[in-house]
Amino acid sequence: MHIGICSLKIYMESSHSLKNSRGITRSLVERVRDRFNVSAAEESDNNLWQTSDIVFCSVGNDIPYINGQISALMTYVESLRLDFEIIDYSTEIISGV
């Protein structure tokens, strides 16, 4: 069993309230979940207006498949025209779980 993890840090320049920030984050998470069937959660700093850390996770038996899924996920997120900018991201595969 292998676990693929993708962590994103996004910046929402136009967000001027916590409600607006959560709306953008929720929209991103729902779109990615629907398209890629991955788990997602907002990480620390979830009370900041303009930044958000989001983690996506995929579990499977095939490392190349998980790598491809995470790569496709990142390509999809970058192609979205939502009101945010990706500041940083990292990916990791944990094997042998």
Image: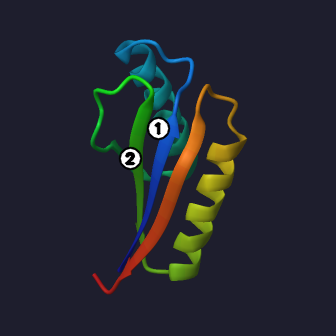
Mark 1 lies on a secondary structure that is helix
Residue 57 location in percent, x, y?
Answer: 40, 58
Residue 70 location in percent, x, y?
Answer: 56, 62
* Residue 73 versus residue 12 in the image, above or below: below
**Between discs 2 and 1, the one toward the N terminus:** 1
Q: Quadrant of residue 80?
A: top right
Specify few, some or many for label 2: CA neighbours under 10 Å numbering under 14, 14-19, or 20 or more.
some
Q: Residue 29 carries which label?
A: 1
Residue drawn at point x = 61 percent, y = 54 percent? 74
Mark pair 2, 1: CA separation? 7 Å
Q: In this view, does 55 lie to the left or right of 75?
A: left
**Amino acid bearing label 2:** Ala
Q: Contact (CB < 8 A) between labels 2 and 1? A: yes
* Residue 11 versus residue 70 in the image, above or below: above
User: What count of labels does the image hold?
Assistant: 2
- Name the image quarter holding the N terminus: bottom left
Q: In this view, does 42 lie to the left or right of 30?
A: left
